[in-house]
Image (cartoon, rainbow, N blue to C red):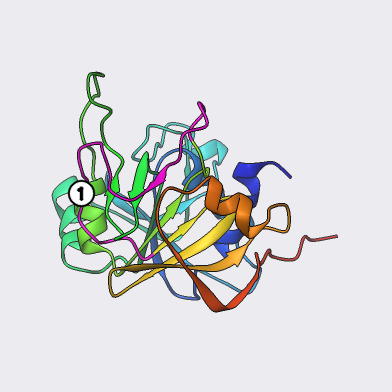
């Protein structure tokens, strides 16, 4: 199992029956593949619909907010972008799952721009992290160059301040409570000392620390 699959599988366990969920582009979109069979959620897309589903032949021209082909589930609703963001800003999204470039120990995140690089725009992340009831960051623990992504303070322009509920990486599950960062789960492939060495942020080890949970794989 590669790092991205492990992360997506663990994030799927955070979703509850009946949740309205927004999945960011990239790694977060994989979460939909690993939902437990007894959990039914409604996926929301910023470009204007509820009921995101698998690709079907009939909906071959339908795309999600990231421009990827997608489908619709029975009962899906379509609307304009203004109404879509009214749902987000009105607090009607239970969970948003986003990737991030950096997260700091206070739960602030930076995920929309790298200084000096051109980007097409900030997208809906700023609205989502403020409007959603829970914000889960799904990202690999370190950057490609090996640098830490969990920092004392973000160095990139912030998307939002102290809005992250949890960060899930391939090495651990971190929770933010009252401005402090707690390690709740740790990968069986890493020791606590190794995890600290790869994490610039200061975190508290939960008294109930356990190995990372993973959903059962269908036989």
Residue 205 as seen in the image, left or right of residue 123: right
- Relative depth, front residue between 165 and 91: 165
Q: Secondary structure at mark 1?
A: helix
Residue 80 visible in the shown view? no
Q: How many marks?
A: 1
Which residue is tagged 1? 126
Q: Which residues are magenta?
A: 143-165
Q: Quadrant of the N terminus?
A: top right
Quarter-of-image position of residue 208: bottom right
Seen at 22% across and 46% down, the residue is 159
Residue 182 as seen in the image, left or right of residue 186: left
Residue 173 percent coordinates (x, y)? 53, 62
- Relative depth, front residue between 6 and 108: 108
Residue 73 visible in the shown view? yes
Q: Is residue 128 magenta?
A: no
Seen at 65% across and 51% down, the residue is 6
Seen at 40% across and 53% down, the residue is 201
- Relative depth, front residue between 67 and 120: 120
Residue 166 as seen in the image, left or right of residue 126: right
Against 62, residue 174 (above or below) is below
Residue 181 as seen in the image, left or right of residue 36: left
Residue 120 percent coordinates (x, y)? 23, 24
């Amino acid at each position: 199992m590669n790092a991205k699959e492990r992360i997506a599988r663990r994030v799927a366990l955070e979703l509850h029956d009946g949740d309205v969920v927004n999945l960011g582009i990239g790694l977060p979109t994989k979460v939909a593949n690993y939902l437990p069979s007894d959990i039914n959620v409604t996926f929301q897309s910023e470009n204007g619909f509820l009921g995101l589903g698998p690709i079907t032949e009939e909906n071959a021209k339908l795309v999600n907010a990231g421009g990827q082909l997608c489908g619709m589930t029975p009962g899906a609703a379509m609307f304009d972008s203004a109404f879509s963001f009214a749902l987000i800003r009105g607090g009607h999204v239970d969970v948003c799952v986003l990737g991030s470039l950096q997260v700091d120990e206070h739960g602030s995140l930076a995920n929309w721009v790298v200084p000096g690089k051109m980007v097409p725009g900030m997208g809906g992340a700023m609205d989502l992290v403020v409007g959603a009831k829970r914000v889960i960051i799904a990202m690999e623990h370190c950057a490609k160059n090996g640098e830490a992504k969990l920092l004392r303070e973000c160095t990139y322009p912030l998307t939002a301040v102290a809005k992250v509920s949890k960060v899930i990486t391939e090495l651990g599950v971190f929770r933010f409570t009252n401005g402090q960062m707690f390690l709740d789960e740790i990968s069986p492939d890493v020791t606590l000392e190794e995890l600290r060495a790869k994490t610039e942020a200061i975190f508290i080890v939960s008294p109930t620390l356990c190995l990372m949970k993973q959903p059962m794989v269908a036989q």
